[in-house]
Amino acid sequence: MKFQFLFFLLLICAFTSHSQVLRKRTSLLMGGRFDISIVDKDSLSAEQNIDAVINEITRIENLISDWKPDSQVSEVNQNAGIRPVKVDKEVFELTQRAIQFSEMTNGGFDISFAAMDKIWKFDGSMTQMPSAEAIQKSVEKVGYKNIILDSVQSTVFLKLKGMKIGFGALGEGYATDKCRDMMLAKGIKAGIINGSGDMSTWGKQPNGKPWNIGITNPFHPEKLVAVVPLKQDAVTTSGSYEKFVVFNGKRYSHIINPATGYPATGLCSVTVFGPNAETANGLSTSLMVLGKTAGLLLLNKYADYSCIMITDDGKVVKSKNSRIKKFKARL
């Protein structure tokens, strides 16, 4: 009888230790929507860990936001052409990685895009293209080569007055990665941090099934091109299917090439998969700007990353190492 009771007790303990709950919360952070899902031992612990994630994202936002006047990045921008600004190691290294992307893409990706004059309008008010002179003038203060880093002093200096840097194309992915790492360090075995489409995932759902994400059909947003299972992965999508203009039958994306001032053309959606959301985000943005051919050449330099592209004329293109096997060849 004693043995039976002990066996029953062990069964209860085993069941309790493996039971998991999924808690979700949506919050407005970094100027966008964050959907946070945590799998934990009970609801209270899960909610506390969601609070920890929100606190971490808020901390990062307060460091790198270029629209918060007291952030370190805003201080860098306010002192453009005046003096170098000392920043935390975290901000310095993020800036370093952004400049590496700029070098890899020959300026197709550039964190100094924040200084670009907003001459393109994607709210339906544009009736004609801006002039070549206006476009050239719009990027006069853009140029990653004018960002001077001092690793000894941990300073960032923008050489030209009026220059600005911004982490709109990397910041959310960086935040989701940091939060995933924080949760893994705490022993949280599964979850998703989704920052406006920049997604870091780990583990499995409570029922043991993998997390699944769908790739939106840009021509019919209520439909999916493919559904992809994820483990400890990141995925980001850049697209023009919600904001674009058409002139003379040609589609111009809201994603602007910071080197030229002209909108990206040729692709309406790029989804990148890999271990790191920051890198995936940089790649998806860069591929939109570079286009199909140059974009695939760039992606080939990142062995752990793959992509699926959808062209303006509805053709689906995937990288050689893509895990997606089934999709419609043409939309």
Image (cartoon, rainbow, N blue to C red):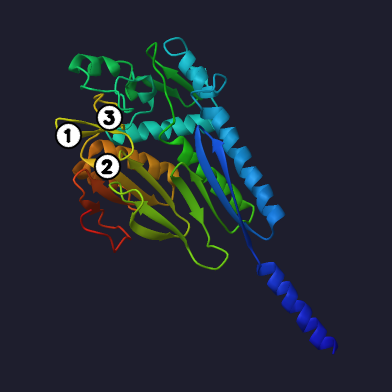
Q: What residue sits 48% from the left and 38% below the top? A: 172
Instruction: Write down the quadrant of residue 29 in the picture.
Output: top right
Q: Nearer the viewer, mark 1 or mark 3?
A: 1
- Identify which amino acid the numbered label 3 is placed on: Asn
Question: Position of 66 compared to 136: left or right?
Answer: right
Q: Could one spot residue 153 in this view of the protein?
A: no
Most extreme residue toward the bottom is 1
Give x and y (percent) for residue 320. Answer: 25, 57
- Identify which amino acid the numbered label 1 is placed on: Lys
Q: Could one spot residue 186 in this view of the protein?
A: yes
Residue placed under numbered mark 2 in the picture: 268
Residue placed under numbered mark 3 in the picture: 257
Mark 1: few/some/many CA within 10 Å (<14, 14-19, 20+) = few
Q: Give the Cα distance between marks 1 and 3.
A: 16 Å
Q: What residue sits 65% from the left and 49% below the top? A: 49
Question: Position of 46 compared to 160: left or right?
Answer: right
Q: Give the Cα distance between marks 1 and 2.
A: 12 Å
| Circle nearer the N terminus (1, 3) | 1
- What is the number of the mark on residue 250? 1
Q: Give the Cα distance between marks 3 and 2.
A: 14 Å
Front residue of this view, candidates 228 and 86? 228
For the residues labelled 3 and 2, say whether their Cβ atoms are less than 8 Å apart.
no
